[in-house]
Amino acid sequence: MKLYTLTVLALLAIPAWGQYAPSASGSTTAAAEINSKPAFQTGTSDPANCTAGKDLFFNTSSLVWKFCTATNTWTSAAKIIASGSLALATSSISSAACQTVTAGSVNSATATGTATTDAINFTANGSIKAVTGYVPGTTGGLTITAYPTTNNVNFDVCNWTSSAVTPGAVTVNWQVIRQ
């Protein structure tokens, strides 16, 4: 069994070690030609040229990933600035009101490096459809909206019902993204 496994692995590796590799049309192409331009590069400044759909570049000075577009130009991939989780407040929210956000504390978390122009992706860490205030209904409910401030992520929890609601416990996982 071990010999068989080794043989299969060796046969699979032949195109990488040998001089030829099959193309989609069935013909063969020299391995040197296939590998003439690496798909992944690193450096402190963008390379002058790239091949669309093939090249990926990591700028080691700005710590930004870039990929080659259909027009053979580099574009930045989104960069994660900060991430974490936050337990939202469970204090009562009056009708047609939102909980007060306190920077870095109530419904807010420190996210060093965050700018007001960044985007926030977030999701609850579990299903909230059975959590008080978030249960689906025709009379409204609570909503959660995220927004950035300098060095913080903030979450407005707002009540769209006609009476006060004391929300159940919800924890959100979040990421600050910069394009």
Image (cartoon, helix red, strand yellow):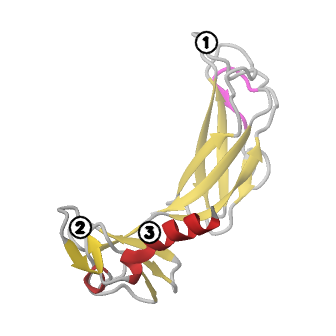
Residue 108 location, x and y as percent? 72, 50
- The residue at 30%/84% (across/down) is 19
Residue at image point 23% right, 67% down: 23
Query: Label 3 sits on what residue type?
Result: Leu
Q: Nearer the viewer, residue 18 or 159?
A: 18
**Left or right: 18 as drawn, with respect to 120:** left
- Magenta span of residues: 93-99
Name the disc covering residue 155, or none: none
Above or below, comparing residue 89 to residue 159 in the picture: below
User: Does residue 50 appear left or right of residue 172 in this picture?
Assistant: left
Q: Nearer the viewer, mark 1 or mark 3?
A: 3
Crowd rating for badge 1 (residues with CA inside 10 Å; few <14, some 14–19, many 20+): few
Q: What amino acid type is highlighted by mark number 2?
A: Ser
Q: Residue visible at 57% across and 65% down?
A: 5
Which residue bears the numbered disc 3? Answer: 12
Neighbour tally class for label 2: few under 14, some 14-19, many 20 plus, Cα within 10 Å? few
What is the spatial separation of the Cα atoms under label 1 and label 3, in whole angstroms? 57 Å
Q: Is residue 54 in sight in this rendering?
A: yes
Whether tag 3 and tag 2 are in contact, CB under 8 A, the answer is no
Return the mark for residue 23. Answer: 2
Residue furthest top in the image: 138
The magenta stretch spans residue 130:
no
Front position in the image: 135 or 41: 41
Given contact means CB atoms under 8 Å apart, are the residues at marks 1 and 3 in contact? no
Residue 128 percent across, percent down from the top left = 69, 27
Q: Which residue is mark 1?
A: 137
Q: Is residue 113 left or right of residue 20?
A: right
